[in-house]
Image: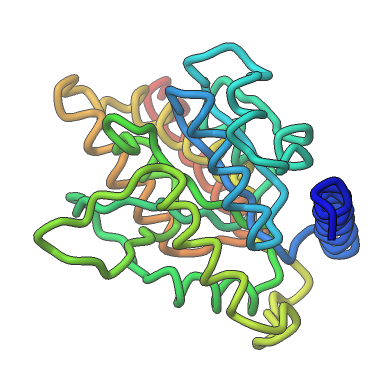
Amino acid sequence: MAGTDRTRLRAGELRRAKTQATDKLAADPAAAPVVILVDPQLGENVGMVARAMLNCELTRLRIVRPRKSWPSDKAIRASSGAEVVLEKAEVFDTTEEAIADLHRVYAATARSRDMTKQVVTPEQAAAEIRGAGLATGILFGGEAKGLHNDDVALADSILMAPLNPGFSSLNLAQAVLVVAYQWYRSGDPDAGEDMHLRGSRPATKKELVGFFEHLESALDDSGFLHVEEKRPSMVRNLRNVFQRAELTEQEIRTLRGVIKSLVIYGNSKRKG
């Protein structure tokens, strides 16, 4: 076969792969997780992430505070044909905004954190995502320092690959590929048990963050968070408590009603 014919055949295969991945996602938008890059530094790395994603039929990419301007020509060149991922990529100013519409979030990290959180392997996470059928995201940190503790605190679980404990360093695209590959090979996206939520649904991250801010504002007013140097860790601990509860939308509304009632009662006692 002539070189020109081989090139045309390869280009056709790439187009078909892109179309199949996009069609598959459109048919079931909750089936595949969103890949969220927080503070990526180099466009080339974002492009290689897109390449790793499309290898595993993932096409939803969100970017939080990219250091380089976006869209990036270097990212496109490094993607090696995975432009369909980059074309649909969304850019956000904060992690909270990037996860607002998601029901469950994993934080991919190789470092142990001083937090009480479930730690799962990529294989376990893939099985959970497939079984739940919920809008899910996976956070990956920047190339230099990884995820900030405040980003990890927003996640439901820590995702950690079982690698050589003496050397577990991965570059950004490698980390995404390890996780995405387990998703790809985990089988039937319809497998797993149904969730029975008695007429409600899992709370979105936007609803959960709104509850956090409501609670923290009330605690600020009451003086509970008055020690400034301890406030960040206390806030993270409180958020982790409620993250583990896997609250529903109805439970969030109930808890916000409880906070409102306590604030009104406290104000009336002080006036009395």
Q: Is residue 121 left or right of residue 134?
A: left
Q: Is residue 183 above or below residue 36?
A: below
Q: Quadrant of the N terminus?
A: bottom right
Q: Is residue 116 above or below residue 78?
A: below
Q: In the image, residue 253 lies at what x, y percent? A: 64, 50
Q: In the image, residue 46 lies at what x, y percent? A: 54, 33
The quarter holding residue 131 reads bottom right
Residue farthest to the left, as pictured: 166
Q: Quadrant of the C terminus?
A: top left
Q: Is residue 269 left or right of residue 211?
A: left
State the residue at coordinates (59%, 22%). 74
Q: In the image, residue 198 lies at what x, y percent? A: 73, 77
State the residue at coordinates (87%, 61%). 20
The answer to whether residue 187 of the structure is visible from this angle is yes
The quarter holding residue 61 reads top right
Q: Is residue 232 left or right of residue 229?
A: right
State the residue at coordinates (21%, 51%). 111
Q: Considering depth in this image, is 121 or 50 the residue closer to the camera? A: 50
Q: Considering depth in this image, is 268 or 47 the residue closer to the camera? A: 47
State the residue at coordinates (9%, 60%). 166
Q: In the image, residue 89 lies at what x, y percent? A: 71, 34
